[in-house]
Amino acid sequence: MSELIDILLGDSADTRNRPLEDFCDTADVGSLLAECAELDRFRREHANLYERVRALFFLHAIHRFHLPSKESFETAGSIPFQGHESLLERRYGEAIDAFLLTQDRQGPNAVISSALAEAYHRLAFQTLANQVRRSVRSVRGNQWMFRVGHSADHPLRIQPRLLKKDLSTGLFPIIAETTAVRMDLTHSAWSDIFFLGMDYPAGARVLNISIDLCVHGTGEPRPPVEAYVRVIDEPILRLCSVDLETSAEIQSIGEVFDFAKDYLGLLKAAVIASGIIPPGIESSRQTLEELLARIAGPDRGIEVVSKVNNIPKGSRLAVSTNLLGCLVSACMRATGQVGSLEGPLDENERRIVASRAILGEWIGGSGGGWQDSGGVWPGIKLIEGVEANKDDPEYGVSKGRLLPRHHIFPTEEIPPGSRRKLEESLVLVHGGMAQDVGPILEMVTEKYLLRSASEWKARQDAIRLLDQMIAALKQGNIEQVGRLTQQNFDGPLKAIIPWATNEYTEAIIEQVDEEFGNDFWGFWMLGGMAGGGMGFLFAPWKRLEAQKRLGEILQANKTRLESALPFAMDPVTYEFSINENGTSATLRNGSDALLPTSYYQTTLPKLLRQENHKLTPTRQSELDQVRKASLSNIELAQALIDKSQSAKNTSSNVTQRSLDQALGSNGFDPAQHEQIRADIKAGRIGLAQNRLPPNTLIQDVPLEELINATEATEQLPKEWEQAGQEALTSGKVAVVTLAGGAGSRWTRGAGVVKALHPFAQFGGRHRNFLEVHLAKTLRSSNLSGTDIPHVATTSYLTQKPIETWLQESESTLHLSPGRYVGLRTVPTIRDLRFHWEETPQQILDEQAQKMQESLRGALLDWARNTGEGTDYRDNLPLQCMHPVGHWYEIPNLLRNGVLARLLDEHPDLEYLLVHNIDTLGTDLSPSLLGAHILSGNDLTFEVIRRNLEDRGGGLAKINGQNRIIEGLAMPHEECEFDLSWYNTLTNWVSISGLLRFFQLEKTDLSNEDRVALAIRKASDRMPTYVTLKDVKKRWGRGQEDIFPVAQFEKLWGDMSALSGIHCGYLSVPRMRGQQLKEPAQLDGWLRDGSAAFVDSLCKW
Amino acid sequence: MKVRKAVITAGSPDQRNLPLQTLIDGDGTEKTVLQILVEEALRANVEEVAIIVQPGDETTFSKVVPEHAHRLRFIPQEEPRGYGHALSLGREFVGDESFLHLVGDHLYVSSGKRGCAEHLVRTAEEQGCAVSAVQATRENLLPYFGTVGGRCHAGHQDLYEIDTVLEKPTPTLAEQELIVPGIRAGHYLCFFGMHVLTPMVLELLTEKLEEPDTRPTLSEALNQLAQREKYLALVMQDNRYDVGIKYGLLTAQLDVALNGQDRDEVLNRMLTLLAQRESR
């Protein structure tokens, strides 16, 4: 039997917990492939879901890490387009079959393994996610909602008390629910991920505390989330989020399920998950009016209002899950599913509310951990995974139940004194960073299932630390709690996920530690990663001082790093107290039956504009009551006046002025912009026009037509090394790092400088991309005994931050500022549709896909209403402008005088190594430089064997000519899959050839007009591509919207298509040419040895 | 155990005329709802029937059942404290005997020769315990009924041992507490409006009524009963009709007629009516 299947099915825990690398590190290619065949058969035939999933993760790891690391493993191969399509459509099983067939035909190789690794990985997560969803649906108490398909089937009724208007005021009563949020004291190594809890219930344990909160300086802590439900006398569903200042009057069932149409997705999810509009009724063609009549009576409707009390998004305190719980609880009270209209819930009710909140998150296309609805429970509790028994729907499928068990610590166990001490020691903060924890949670799941030795040990350590923390809390020893949370962060958490921390967090901890010494008891990471919600424990006598200083330290570090790391907002510190109620409600009657002041701030202006007779009787009574209340409540009156005044002020003009200034000072060419805009509107350029004609002959380039440099350096021709070494020693080479781009995939359009992102630790601390490139140049300088100049090209977006960083870091770097900038435009409907419908798109899971389709409808409306092809100005100036493609970055060197200066300072300079900011493995390899010199090329592009993730063009024979082709110029998507070589964008440039192309002499470089004219002439020969980029627009308290906007680009690779410049191609090893495009790649990059390879090229 | 007595509740202020509604019984004679109910009880070998009525209704009610007047006893419900209170007023009448209980606004139509009450009483006498007639009911009707949860009674396909009784539960609660093996998904065992109860039930109701201003439901008392003594549910395959709801009486009449001696005539009339409507 297979050794790995032995691990999967092992009787003893020791066998089952044996790390995969134990076997794979020493196994040869043949035995690894044999194991893969066994594992694939096992995952198809075996009944147990979790063992199947583990087999899938084994397969992923072998194909992703272990096979490619074996020296004898073939590197050449290709990926079938049909498999790629299946991947995009989430038909992972079919994709695997297609890839395996190709593997049989071609023989095993690294290229097809990259595709198999991805497909197995995705199938594993799809299987797990489907299982969680099935469990959510099958929880008793949730099932009936999926059976209701007609209004007449609806079994819920609004509680009679809510249907009775107060005779004196004419108002319906209101359920007012308030709920705590939760903080997780122990973290327990992300053990609250559903998959972990369901597979390893014994290891899924967290210490979870319900808290009230307020931002420091804004009053006393109170329950952070509130929900209100009442009957209204219109047959509609009225939803209002007062903190997002949005409301909607919903008149059809379809609108309830349209989550992305507005900012009311969470309220809609609550209305659905609470059973008011049960999920089974979607697409049933029923009218909302009939359904509401059934549950609330004829001509009656329901209003649901949510309110978050000034807690910013991304707090890591599960605000949205607890708000969902709060809304669900209020809706369930209104429909009698919770016994009482007032007061806290009982345990059974809390559990059903929590399961409905999980259901709501699933319906809304998001998802949290199982401890997130902890705010529904009171006080301090231990939440633990529970083994499934035969009465549970999970029995036989997973080891654990979906819903955990909550043990609320009574005061006999954790006395009031301990709770008070915790309140007196802890400073809670929001560091302000915008974060995407999704990739981290995937990494945790994968590592857990692979049982990698160090991570498995770390998980056991975290479990032990939890018990110690509970003991310390029971004893009231908060100092010990602090030491343990710090130990947990430094030990298990960083061991499992090194990316959970970052330079920002580390700097803050270091400064706090320095400043407060022994009075700083420990740091505590809240949620998935550090940088957002965080806790710092201090000696109580230092807490107030520490709270003040921490605010300053956070702000100073944020200012220092805000160009490098994505921040959604300024840091804040909180006041908090332990909430001993969980979720709780009151019933407002008579003249008290009014909604919060902020509700009226949002809705009143619109109501007052309506004629009185158009308002329903209850609305009229309500306005009358608000009027009466504002006579006696001066704060209410003041708030309403303030709001109407602030609506009149606008900062829009200021933004427009600064955008025009920024455009003016960054080389914006209005005439060119006007032309491009006209071309876009007229359809002369656009996404469809980016493509080469369909009859273009595109062929793969055989290895023989490239300079083959894929072998280890010592096996490359000696004369290459000699020529390169000689050029290096005699100062003939400079490095140019392209750092002008926005790095939009890295930060999803957050507008920070990727070059400055301290993405990983080298030499004992976090380093940014530029530091890594400089360290490689330093090593080459030391080896060659010369001072090799290093240039970074910048743009309007990156120039200033890089300049500031340079001053602080005292690094030696020449900056080549951008001289061209564009203004983004609102995309055309044609381009949006082309992008979504004509190019293969990743299909999401069922609910997320629904969300996406709804969002796309909203974006089409936005483009239509704003004006297709009009200037995009509705954002910060830097987000409205765009770099015009990396083609301009080399001509910029000519135009801004940097090349002339370099030639002055280094008269022997003949060659440039130009590379992108994210190609970390590139260095001044003497052999490759020598290959370029000896080839006599003007430009030599480095290419690598194309793996699955290498999308966006490459080397091809186009109508008989070898050249680089961009992905967006491919006539058909599948063409790319016939090409073996991916363009790394690293290229060696002979300066003389470059100048010849531009028809310039070295002496012309000082003549600005001549250079500008030369560039314009060359630019006219370059194709212009229209692309869509996602741009973030921030608003409110940490809220973000993402808009696809149009921009144009000219790309450097197209130089290879022009006459008058001689280009060649070097095939290089993958580690040298691969690019880091997304943070989600980091963990694989660390694990597959790439990080160590980069480190070996550096001198720190 | 021998069931000799029956209690019919007909004291609801807004339904006081329902027992007086008339329809044609299966034997072709015109009868009131009350008359049919009393006869249903008597068919089950009950000897005495107490009817809980609104004060002042005694004479009217006694007139509509003249042939059985000697077996009837009317008990007025002086305080409007609901259904549970009404039933509790039968305590003195019942004494320490188990009794049949029917609700005055329902009609029961048996598809077999044996009456519904007769079937229930025989089962209770055989089992020697309280038995409630129940029917598998779709979850959308839960807002109208008391509902039971329990497990199969060994050796009997149509009997369940009741663990829990909830009055008009939400489907959320029903799914958690009242799932019964062998019943179709989305269906629950809801009361049929007919029970054989032990005196303990009346004791429990009386206890609850000692608290002022309470309006205990029968379901609450039955839930307690399930914790104290053996209590079974008998699944009825027959039909029951709430004559208090829209078209309730009409539907009941049709079912009674279609099960009675005038079946062909009624069918004929219905078909003629339909044909005439269609041809217009």
Image (tube, grey):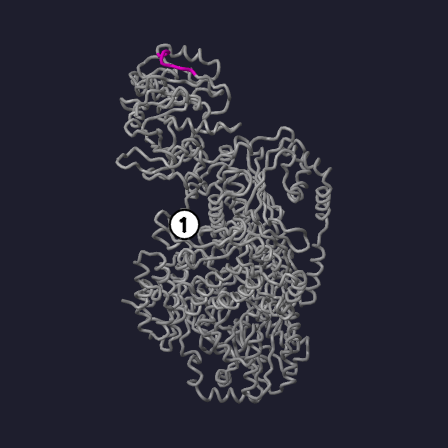
Q: Quadrant of the C terminus of chain B?
A: top left
**Quick check: A386 above or below A55?**
above
Disc 1: host chain: A
- Give A699 or A416, whichever is nearer the viewer: A416
Residue A990 lies, with reference to residue B140, above or below; the image says: below
Residue A129 is covered by the magenta coloring? no
Q: Position of residue A934 (x, y in %)?
A: 49, 86
The residue tagged 1 is A135
Residue A429 seen from this side: no
Q: Which residues are magenta?
A: B68-74
Q: Is residue A950 left or right of residue A608?
A: left
Is the N terminus of chain B in the top left, top right, bottom left or bottom right quadrant?
top left
Residue A807 is drawn in which quadrant? bottom right
Q: Of A865 and A1061, which appears nearest the observer?
A: A865
**Callout 1 secondary element:** helix
Can residue A128 be seen here? The reply is yes
Measuring from the top left, give residue A241's x and y in whole percent.
60, 46
The amino acid beneath tag 1 is Ser
